[in-house]
Image: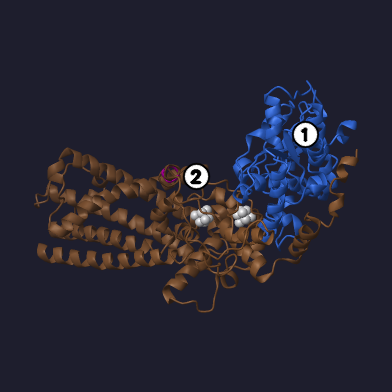
Amino acid sequence: MSANNNVPTMAELAAAGEKPNILFWVGCAGSYDQRYQKVTQALVEILNHLDISFAVLGPEESCTGDPARRAGNEFLFQMQAAANIQLLNGYQVETIVTACPHCFNTLKNEYPELGGDYEVIHHSVFLQRLIDEGRLVIKEGGSFKGRKITFHDSCYLGRANGIYQAPRKVLETLDAELVEMKRCRTTGLCCGAGGAQMFKEPEKGNKDINNERVDEAIDTGAEIVAAACPFCMTMLSDGVKGKGKEEEVKVLDLAELIAQNKG
Amino acid sequence: MTLISQISFVLVAAFFGFFLARRIKNIRANIQLGRSENRNDNPDKRLKNMFLVAFGQKKMFKRLIPALLHLLIYVGFLVINLEVLEFILDGLLGTHRLFAPFLGGFYTFCLNLFEFMALGVVISCVVFLARRNLLKLSRFWDAEMTSWPRLDGNLILIIEIVLMAAIFTMNSTDQILQERGAGYTTTGTFIISAQLMPLFESLSTQALVMVERFAWWIHIIGILAFALYVTYSKHLHIFMAFPNTYFANLEAPGKMVNMPEVTKEVNIMMGLQAEEGSAEPPPTRFGAKDVQDLTWYNIMNAYACTECGRCTSECPAHLTGKKLSPRKIMMDVRDRVEEIGQTGEQNGKSLLGDYISKEEIFACTSCNACVEACPVNIDPLNIILQLRRYTAMEESSSPADWNNMFSNIETNFAPWKFPAADRFNWSKKS
Ligand code: SF4
Ligand code: SF4
């Protein structure tokens, strides 16, 4: 898809004396994780489809420091933050869109105190706004019409930042049947990856958290588990695969669902 | 006779008053063991939180039936304690039902209301006892609910039932004595305790007076003892819920508390800030190893904890059999601070290590489920993260996987072992 390949970087635009409206913060998972690269591309496709003026940092981007901070390494976090803030302020960035709730939380809540003040928008809210404004139109009777979708709340989107409605509103536009898991919204069960758990083996226990969550998702009878976070994506996909259900149950990101059904 | 009872009353009240005051001073000092932290901003928002969460019990109502029963006990307890004022004045002045002649019919109405509340309290307490002991709700039987926390939970319910039974006995015998013209102030009928009158009617007038006085003393001593007992028990939340919700976090729950001392060092290292004469002394350590390294608010949290286990029952780590329990974190902080407060010394122990293990804190996903679940806005996650900071920055004792992740970020600027130069390769894929 050619639409995917049109990805301007901040450096290129700055060299041409231009400044985009939006910085798309891709994040480490969006950059390196093979599965989440697809989500990054889906979002780029939507941005290009709507002719939105955006750019990425490309090779200049660097970890926000979130996992280091949650694991207790404040020094490393602050080094990352200071470098990123220098870069972002250098480009006079005002608005950031990201598809990672962890990057979102750090950029939005933790960078201002360190000198990085931006409007930070998670892609679920960004997509919802585009739909509300009538700019992003969803095909009538798209491929998900009438199919059962359940949404898994990411902790860093939901409880951490109070975003519960936006992703659900985005899903509603697909004309699908939205079903909720037993534990959802404020009581949504974590996928097990937050707080830097993504980067280590779980402590001793009797079950992996993602399996507990996937059981709940499968219980709803949904064919699609919608996620809005790269770590949730990994944990849920692994859980579904572990149960041998990858044919019946698909784990997809909001951006992918929308990209497939945009009018 | 009245003089003796007046003097006894003053002595009893002074006795409890003395120990109560000492205990309150003690708790204050323990809370002040924590680091200072300013939580006085936004008084309007804070008052509103306190009003909704502590007074209005907003978060209790996530589970309707226990919330209603709890509300009944809470309101009943508050209202009935208005009557204690009369008890205390009667005790000091040697009078009997001091307010009755002044209030007349309104007095009868109030006491009927109290009795109605008292009955509600009794019913709720019985249901709660059954829930704890017969239904064995799992969150009341987890590992950290050892014999004392379990006894504490039951004891308070039983005490409340005894206190209420004393009120009914007193009112019932009082009404018989009024009928017999034994010199008791007329009050009108108290509907509920009137039902109990047949139980006592066979007694002689003298015996009735004894029973009535006995019930009066049981009730007032019970209330005073209760006030003292509460300060040693999880029931301190009756009072601590108020300051605890007032000072609760107002920012996004996902935001971690900044460490300005680290910001400063990093800025100096990166040449963003010149090294200046240190205005403040450097912190003794990074992160928290013991309760003194926590903030006063963390310690206040521990005193406000009701050990209800709502946090633990939502914790993904606990639900999947990991050792972590956010309730235990709170109970450990309280036990440790009490230990320091009592012995007045360090005794070589510390919170991390002797009370809380690394296995527990490393199991946390920082999902905020515990914070969301707590009916009095306690934040166990904040404490867990401070302990982790200590392990990472002072001890370098993080799990090996995390140490690898740290070095990946240092060298590749990503938590995985991918070269930084490949970061933008995704744009070339289709
Ligand atoms: S934040 Fe940590 S302690 Fe609290 S519920 Fe989540 S995993 Fe458990
Ligand atoms: S921290 Fe809150 S939810 Fe947890 S046991 Fe204590 S009072 Fe209950």
Does mark 2 fall on the same chain as mark 1? no
Q: Are marks 1 and 2 in contact (CB under 8 Å)?
A: no
Label 1 CA crowd tier, 10 Å (few <14, some 14–19, many 20+): few
Where ligand 1 lies, by quadrant? bottom right
Type of amino acid at the residue the image marks with label 1 = Glu
> Is residue A4 among the parts visible in the rendering?
yes
Which image quadrant: the N terminus of chain A? top right
Label 2 CA crowd tier, 10 Å (few <14, some 14–19, many 20+): some
Name the quadrant containing residue B89. bottom left
Type of amino acid at the residue the image marks with label 2 = Lys
> Which tag is nearer the camera, tag 1 or tag 2?
1
Q: Which residues are magenta?
A: B46-51
> Is residue A240 among the parts visible in the rendering?
no
Mark 2 = which residue? B59
Q: Is residue B378 a member of the stretch shown in magenta?
A: no
Name the quadrant containing residue B428. top right
**Nearest to the observer: residue B325 or residue B425:** B425
For the stretch drawn in magenta, the main secondary structure is: helix
Q: Secondary structure at mark 1?
A: loop
Residue B94, x across and y down, in percent: 12, 58
Q: Residue at x 71, y 44 (%)?
A: A90
Residue A165, x across and y down, in percent: 63, 34
Q: Residue at x 27, y 64 (%)?
A: B17
Q: Secondary structure at mark 2?
A: helix
Mark 1 = which residue? A18
Q: Is residue B86 above or below residue A53?
A: below
Q: Residue at x 82, y 47 (%)?
A: A59
Cα gap from disc 1 to disc 2, whole angstroms: 50 Å
- Say which chain tag 2 marks: B
Name the quadrant containing residue B102. top left
